[in-house]
Image (tube, helix red, strand yellow):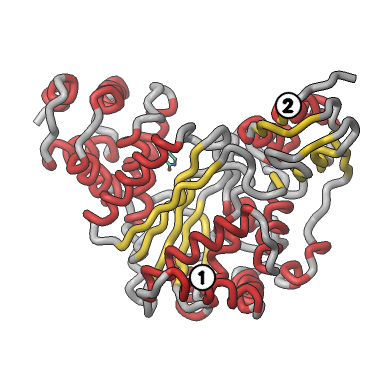
């Protein structure tokens, strides 16, 4: 087999066989192809698409190029969740302890912040002492004994994805739905859970800008997972504005703990919805029963206590979960005030995520530390009525170098209707 024959087929919109897809993926993993050959294939897929069968094979072959995590030593049903990424999207930190407290084993490998979006691993590390790089044996032990563990995804998961992802980034092929689906699902299948929930985001702060594309992506990923023998469910949720109040690791830990303390807000709604969908599959129960169980785990504090137990098992200071003032604070803060009056009609999450990065909360280079304590706390949502001088948000920072730029960017990100200029 030669790569040029495969390129020819894809260019002519013909279906690749399973053997051909396997040849391509394994060649990528072993660096057997030239960059231009891989790029040409990615572009042909991006333009001409793939059938569900081709995408399923692509995903399974990509998963097999790295470690396939074996969770069989853990008793009971193992579940995992994946969000396609967004701003102030802290559901994992609430969902994992809620479900673990209800007996669903949560074995979760998470990522760091990517682009303008936040990452679960960085958020957990905002809890003093929390280790996300524990050994695989300790990960399995924690899931078995406590019911949950969240660690950072190891480098040897879906090796081909790493190479393809880097190539997609520079060939304008990131947005292809079969390529996104296979990238996400190859890592999820390799992570070994029985149940996988996908939280597919759409809107200004998400990868998929429209609900239609998010729905298409979610259906394809559910099909791939089912074809691979997994129990699958998906929700579509809005990223037209940040999900929680905080944008930045420390603030997002606080938001998640508030959900576990019974807060009622959009973050709580999406987190509970995820828990209910997973519980229904894990315990074979109806919506009402699952909802009651989730509400009880929050009201009787078993989910909050479970979070503290998880934090302690991974070296973190569990006292923080009961006393949020122990979280590391930024050196300074400043309120951003409305310069016009009216109703908030748009909040651009991507701009806010990038602002948090500028404050030092994200990485421009791999070696940047990513400060946990800096970020933004939102005081408004779409629909909030504001008067001139009202606080739109608070910026937390250590160094005032970029604060003015961030303030201006925030004022551009938050659009107010019925504008009256000062
Ligand atoms: N997340 C991934 O892991 N891969 C994609 O292609 C998009 C989001």
> Residue 64: image x %, image y %?
26, 51
| Relative depth, front residue between 163 and 343 | 343
- Percent coordinates x, y for residue 100 in the rendering: 51, 73
Judge left or right: residue 422 versus residue 118.
right
Nearest-to-viewer mark from 2 and 1: 2
Tag of residue 417: 2
Closer to the chain start, of discs 2 and 1, is 1
Q: Quadrant of residue 324?
A: bottom right
Query: Local crowd at mark 1 within 10 Å, few (<14), some, or many (≥20)?
Result: some
Instruction: Return the residue found at the far front.
Output: 418
187 relative position to 249: left or right: left
Q: Position of residue 401 (x, y in %)?
A: 83, 29
Quarter of the image for the N terminus: give it.
top left
- SS at mark 1 in the image: helix
Point out the quarter of the image occupied by ligand 1.
top left
Position of the C terminus by quadrant:
top right
Vertical placement of 317 versus 343: above or below?
below
Q: Residue at x 14, y 20 (%)?
A: 12
Can you identify the residue that label 1 sits on?
291
Residue 264 x, y percent position in the rendering: 67, 61
The foreground one among 392 and 322 is: 392
Mark 2 and mark 1 residues within 8 Å of each other at the beta carbon? no
Q: Residue furthest left?
A: 1
Q: Give the vertical position of 225 relative to 87 (above or below).
A: below
Residue at x 43%, y 63% (from the top left corner): 277
261 is higher (above) or lower (below) than 167 = below
Residue at point 58% right, 72% down? 295
């Amino acid at each position: 087999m030669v790569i040029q024959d495969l390129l020819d087929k894809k260019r002519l919109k013909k279906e690749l066989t399973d053997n051909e897809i396997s040849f391509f993926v394994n060649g990528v993993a072993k660096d057997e192809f030239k960059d231009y050959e891989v790029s040409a294939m990615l572009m042909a897929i991006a333009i001409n698409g793939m059938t569900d069968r081709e995408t399923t094979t692509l995903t399974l072959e990509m998963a097999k190029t790295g470690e396939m995590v074996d969770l069989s030593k853990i008793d009971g049903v193992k579940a995992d969740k994946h969000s396609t990424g967004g701003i102030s999207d802290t559901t994992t930190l609430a969902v994992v302890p809620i479900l673990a407290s209800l007996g669903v084993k949560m074995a979760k490998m998470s990522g760091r912040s990517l682009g303008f979006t936040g990452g679960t691993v960085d958020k957990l590390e905002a809890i003093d002492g929390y280790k996300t790089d524990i050994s695989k044996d300790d990960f399995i032990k924690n899931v078995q004994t406590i019911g949950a563990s969240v660690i950072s995804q190891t480098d040897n998961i879906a090796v081909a994805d790493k190479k393809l992802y880097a190539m997609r980034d520079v060939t304008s092929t990131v947005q292809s739905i079969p390529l996104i689906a296979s990238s996400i699902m190859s890592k999820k299948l390799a992570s070994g859970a029985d149940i996988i929930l996908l939280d597919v985001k759409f809107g200004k702060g998400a990868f998929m800008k429209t609900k239609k594309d998010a729905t298409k992506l979610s259906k394809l990923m559910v099909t791939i997972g089912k074809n691979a023998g997994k129990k699958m469910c998906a929700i579509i949720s809005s990223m037209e504005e940040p999900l929680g109040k905080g944008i930045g690791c420390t603030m997002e830990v606080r938001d998640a703990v508030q959900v576990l303390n019974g807060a009622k807000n959009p973050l709580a709604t999406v987190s509970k919805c995820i828990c209910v969908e997973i519980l229904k599959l894990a315990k074979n129960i109806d919506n009402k029963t699952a909802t009651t169980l989730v509400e009880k785990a929050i009201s009787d504090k078993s989910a909050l206590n479970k979070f503290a137990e998880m934090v302690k098992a991974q070296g973190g200071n569990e006292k923080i979960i009961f006393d949020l003032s122990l979280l590391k604070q930024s050196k300074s803060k400043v309120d951003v005030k409305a310069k016009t009056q009216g109703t908030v009609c748009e909040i651009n999450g991507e701009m806010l995520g990038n602002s948090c990065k500028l404050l030092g909360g994200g990485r421009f280079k791999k070696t940047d530390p990513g400060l946990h304590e800096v970020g933004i706390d939102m005081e408004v949502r779409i629909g909030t009525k504001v008067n001139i001088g009202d606080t739109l948000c608070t910026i937390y920072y250590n160094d005032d170098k970029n604060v003015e730029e961030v303030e201006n960017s925030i004022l551009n990100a938050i659009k107010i209707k019925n504008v009256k200029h000062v």
